[in-house]
Image (spheres, rainbow, N blue to C red):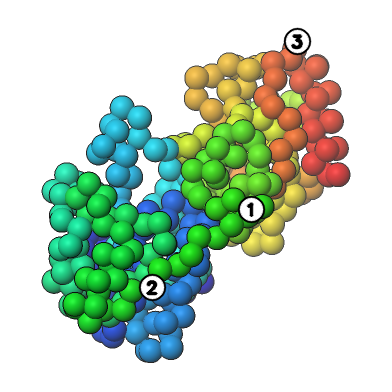
Amino acid sequence: MSSISHFESLESAALPAGPLHLAIGMFDGVHLGHRAVIEAAVQSAQRSGGVAAVLTFWPHPSALFRPQQPTRLITPTSQKISLLAGLGVQAVITHPFTAAYSAIEANNFLRHLRQLLPSLAAVYVGENWRFGRGRLGDIALLLAEGRKLGLHVFSAPRVSLDGEPVSSTRIRSWLEAGEIAAANAALGYSYRATGTVIPGKRLGRKLGFPTLNLDWSPELQPRHGVYAVRVSGAKSPDPLPGVANYGLRLTVESSDTPLLEVHLLGHCPFDAGDTIAVEWLRFIRPEMKFSGVEALRDQIAKDVAAARG
């Protein structure tokens, strides 16, 4: 993975020298559709000896326009940056999405960018991207304003999967429904949870299935249930197979806060304090409440067998 610089506003962006190729968007999930935009910027920058960067935003615009019902994000900023680094992006600007920023007139948007980023040579967006006050700006306006400023504008067509456009909205609905295979296909990689292993109550060990409890609180909660997973970390760069339960631990605790518990199918090299990444591969069953720990133990054994299969 290449190194990447992160700046928390356009004003603070101290980018490397060279023509700037800038991909713009929320890019939540960094899915296949986003990658078509970002990879075009990276490839053009590499051909011209320029700099490939991404302009994204935080919070999601819905937090400003629908504060009572904001969009819950698939990927936190740190994970988004890691995914972008893997695509060859050299710098990420996470600009605050404020009322003042949203009020910039669409026909002034590129001029505003050029003032803050003088080396801007080209912008890359998805064909359905909208911008400016009232979201009145579209690709036609972007192309027209780009010509006036001598900027190249690239519009990537939408990527389809099974005849429907890939979108963050569809991926969110799949994750909430436990349709992890569909979500992974659209993301172009396995959905993952990354966090620090925290001490647990060791009930899994007593049941014969020791677990790693992960400190992980996503905005968008996937469907509660049991999943086949793979786990990696510094102590095992090669992913290890496992089975995970994500939910409220209805049988033993019935907590208000979901917990991700992972049981590895073989030797476990990880312990409390380690940072691990859990890749979600396949949905096995929804979370259930059992009559007691014996019934729970029997079901876990079945879950382990299903994960091995």
Q: Secondary structure at mark 1?
A: loop
Q: Which residue is mark 3?
A: 291
Determine the image quadrant of residue 112. Answer: bottom left
Q: Is residue 114 left or right of residue 265?
A: left
Task: Name the N-terminal-most of marks 1 and 2.
Answer: 2
Q: Amino acid at mark 3?
A: Ser
Q: Amino acid at mark 1?
A: Gly
Q: Which residue is mark 1?
A: 163
Label 2 environment density (alpha carbons within 10 Å; few <14, some 14–19, many ≥20) = many
Residue 132 seen in render: yes
How many numbered marks, from 0 up? 3
Residue 187 seen in render: no
Q: Which residue is mark 2?
A: 154
- Residue 207, image x, y percentages: 76, 26
The image shows residue 302, relative to residue 15, as above or below, that is above
Q: Amino acid at mark 2?
A: Phe
Tag in front: 3 or 1:
1
How far apart are the alpha carbons under marks 1 and 2? Answer: 24 Å
Q: Secondary structure at mark 3?
A: loop
